[in-house]
Each structure stands twice: as structure tokens, then as C-alpha cells.
């Protein structure tokens, strides 16, 4: 496992890129979905990423009680300024949570099946890698979404 500070560098870079995309899009485009079946708006994508961070790092790895409404993440509507303020709060909690991470230790809260039996749910380090995987996957989705919205 990489050092926690190195891990945080990569997570911060992905989040910074997401924030820049939303800032460039502005409120109207950030809340619009591309004309594709099942598409999400940029606000919904970032809201989901914040939920992933809280649920997996804050909850499963750090052991905090997290109330997460995953369905609501994909129905979110927000101003860019409000969402970026929420992101700042999420990042502060993330930094606190990372301070307690023991990469080779089991999760502090049980990861439900089927993920609990996979490397993404077996250790706190696995959880960290899963969160990074989700963030960069959704960063790519956000980049494509931005491009589609600008082309419409």
C-alpha cells in the first residue's frame, strides 16, 4: 500500500479536476444531463463521489456512522458554489478519516456482500484503493459528460 499522504495527493488531484470542471460549467450546465439514456448530470456525478468517499472511507474504513442515500445522489440538484462548499466539508472529513487508516487492518465496519469478500472490502487499504478507483472512473465520466453538454 502507498503511504497515506501519497494516496491523499492522488485523491486530491482527482477532486481538484472535478471541481474545476463544475466551476467551468456553471450552474445551468452542471445540473443538466446529456441526452443519453441513464446519464447523470455533473452535479449528480460529484455528489455520488462525495457519498462514496464518506461511505467507504468514513464508514467502512474509519468506522464512523454514515447515513447515505445513494439514490438521492443521482437525483441531486445544486448550485456549483453550494456543491463545492459541500466538497470542502467532505474533504476535511476525509483527511480526518485518513488519519485513522491502517491499510492492512480489516474494515472497522463490515462491508456487505458481495464486496466484503473481495479485496475492495477485505482491508482498509483495499477500501482506499476502491475509493480512488471510483473517483478516477467518475472523473472520466465527468469529462465525457462535460464534452457532451458543451456539444449539445
Image: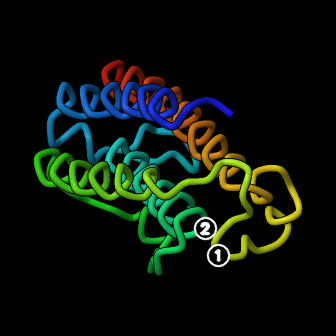
Q: Is residue 21 above or below residue 84?
A: above
Image location of residue 140, percent across then percent down: 52, 26
**Residue drawn at (31%, 44%), measured in percent from left and top?**
32
Q: Earlier in the sequence, mark 1 or mark 2?
A: 2
- The quadrant of the rendering that contains the N terminus is top right
**Which element is circle 2 on?**
helix
91 with respect to 98 (left or right): left
Q: CA distance from mark 1 to mark 2?
A: 5 Å
Residue 97: image quadrant is: bottom left
**Residue drawn at (39%, 64%), measured in percent from left and top?**
75
Q: Which residue is mark 1?
A: 109
**Which element is circle 1 on?**
loop
Q: Say which of 98 and 15 sits in front.
A: 98
**Residue drawn at (74%, 63%), measured in percent from left and top?**
106
* Residue neighbourhood size for the residue with mark 1, other residues' Cα within 10 Å, grouped as few (<14), some (14–19), many (≥20): some
Is mark 1 in CB contact (under 8 Å) with mark 2? Answer: yes
Q: Say which of 4 and 113 sits in front.
A: 4
Residue 122: image quadrant is: bottom right
Q: Is residue 75 above or below residue 89?
A: below
Image location of residue 74, percent across then percent down: 45, 60
Residue 36's tag is none
Residue 60's tag is 2
22 with respect to 143 (left or right): left
The colour style of the image is rainbow
84 with respect to 57 (left or right): left
- The quadrant of the rendering that contains the C terminus is top left
Image location of residue 72, percent across then percent down: 42, 71
Image location of residue 89, percent across then percent down: 23, 56
36 with respect to 13 (left or right): right
Pick out the residue farthest to the right.
117
Q: Is residue 145 above or below residue 120?
A: above
* Residue neighbourhood size for the residue with mark 2, other residues' Cα within 10 Å, grouped as few (<14), some (14–19), many (≥20): many
Amino acid at each position: 500500500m502507498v503511504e497515506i499522504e501519497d494516496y491523499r495527493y492522488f485523491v486530491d488531484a482527482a477532486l481538484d479536476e472535478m471541481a474545476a470542471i463544475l466551476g467551468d460549467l456553471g450552474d445551468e450546465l452542471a445540473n443538466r444531463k446529456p441526452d443519453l439514456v441513464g446519464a447523470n448530470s455533473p452535479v449528480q456525478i460529484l455528489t455520488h463521489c462525495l457519498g462514496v468517499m464518506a461511505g467507504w472511507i468514513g464508514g467502512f474504513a474509519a468506522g464512523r456512522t454514515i447515513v447515505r442515500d445513494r439514490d438521492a445522489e443521482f437525483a441531486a440538484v445544486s448550485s456549483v458554489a453550494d456543491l463545492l462548499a459541500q466538497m470542502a466539508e467532505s474533504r476535511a472529513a476525509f483527511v480526518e478519516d485518513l488519519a485513522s487508516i491502517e491499510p492492512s487492518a480489516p474494515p472497522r465496519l463490515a462491508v456487505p456482500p458481495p464486496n466484503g469478500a473481495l479485496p475492495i472490502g477485505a482491508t482498509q487499504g483495499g477500501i482506499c484503493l476502491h475509493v480512488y478507483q471510483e473517483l478516477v472512473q467518475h472523473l472520466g465520466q465527468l469529462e465525457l459528460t462535460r464534452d457532451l453538454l458543451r456539444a449539445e
